[in-house]
Amino acid sequence: MDTPRVTVVTVVRNLVEAKRADMFRQCVESVRGQSWPAVEHLIIDGASTDGTVNILEQYARQGTLTYRSAPDRGIYDAMNAGLELAGGEFVTFLNSDDFYHDSHFLEVSVQTLLQTGADCSYAPVRMISETGQISEREPYFGACLLYQPICHQTMVYKADILHHYPFHLNFSIAADYEQILRLLLDGRHFCKVPLCSATFRAGGWSVRDISRGNADIALVHLSLYPAWGMSPKQCEQLSESHYIPYSVFQTMLAAIFPEHRPLFKQWRRKEARRQIRHWFLTWKYREGRRSIRILGIWLSRRRQPASSPDKV
């Protein structure tokens, strides 16, 4: 039996200008160091103008990767192009400034997919903040209806399945989250890989522009949940504060494919209990305003400035 190939798709543009060339080299070396014997690293370049193509050409001459350089309509359009050009039976996406810190990631992911027959896999991720702080994030599927629970750098897909789920270009930031929800709502089988092997550098465009990201997530909810009776206002509440009316939540659960329903009913988990307490009673201080949320309703009042001490 032939060893199935894995295609790793990485999207780049103007790495030199963005001062990310060294990070990209770390990304390439981490893919080249994978233990799985059949790996294709495919680079989709958005017509860079700063010398990035020269870097890609050097690696291509070494046989390390293949690349295509052409204009595109953004990162998700480029990721769709990578999916169309991928030659592997399995496909994964790795950002140009992220990397695999464990050489067995692709091997363990593919073996888990083959053993379980799942359509896609996911795993914990290691995160590096802009200040250099390192933390590990566990995927929490129970929150999938609220926000993206999985770092897409840890996901490996069956290529023949993924071709039916391209990224929708009407979402500028949250198209990967919308894709995960479509997979979930269609009853596709997910499996967890018990190995933290990918490192994600926080501070990217989707992380920095939080308000724009919340707006995009609200559009995702509005596009997928109309039959569940959610208004645009409720979609905004869902994306901004993770608050969802109980009646709407019950309707969501009824619409979820049966085998996935237990994922959303893990109320005994400590993390879930903490989130519920957060929704019911929350204090928040921001921009001089003191707020309390009780049963999903925010009550606010402006804090009084502290009086200065009398001068002696």
Image (cartoon, rainbow, N blue to C red):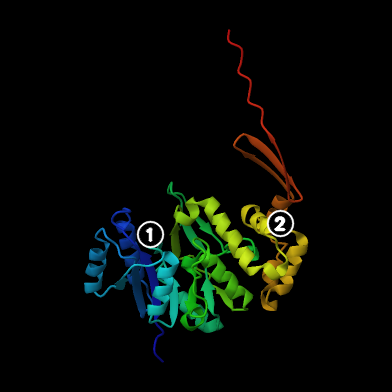
Q: Position of residue 141 (x, y in %)?
A: 62, 66
Query: Dividing the image into 4 quarters, which one contains the C terminus?
Result: top right
Q: CA distance from mark 2 to mark 1?
A: 35 Å
Q: Is residue 200 visible?
A: yes
Query: For this rendering, which residue is in front, 96 or 298?
Result: 298
From the viewer's perspective, tell me whether residue 274 is left or right of residue 119.
right
Type of the residue with mark 2 = Arg
From the viewer's perspective, tell me whether residue 36 is left or right of residue 65.
right
Q: Position of residue 33 (x, y in %)?
A: 34, 70
Q: Is residue 277 above or below residue 73?
A: above
Q: Is residue 189 above or below residue 97?
A: below
Query: How many neighbours does mark 2 have within 10 angstroms: few (below 14), some (14-19), or many (20 or more)?
Result: few
Q: Is residue 147 above or below residue 277?
A: below
Question: Residue 141: which numbered mark, if any?
Answer: none
Mark whose residue sits in front, 2 or 1: 1
Lower position in the chain sequence, tag 2 or tag 1: 1
Q: Position of residue 194 (x, y in %)?
A: 53, 70
Identify the residue at horizontal 40%, vertical 61% (top origin). Answer: 98
Tell me whether the residue at label 2 lies in contact with that at label 1, contact meaning CB atoms closer than 8 angstroms.
Answer: no
Question: Residue 97: which numbered mark, if any?
Answer: 1
From the viewer's perspective, tell me whether residue 226 is left or right of residue 71.
right
Residue reaching furthest to the bottom: 1
Query: Dividing the image into 4 quarters, which one contains the N terminus?
Result: bottom left
Query: For this rendering, which residue is in front, 134 or 43?
Result: 43
Query: For this rendering, which residue is in front, 216 or 155?
Result: 216
Q: Is residue 33 visible?
A: no
Identify the residue at horizontal 43%, vertical 69% (top origin). Answer: 77
SS state under label 2: helix
Give the quadrant of residue 252: bottom right
Which residue in the structure is indicated by mark 2? 273
Type of the residue with mark 1 = Asp
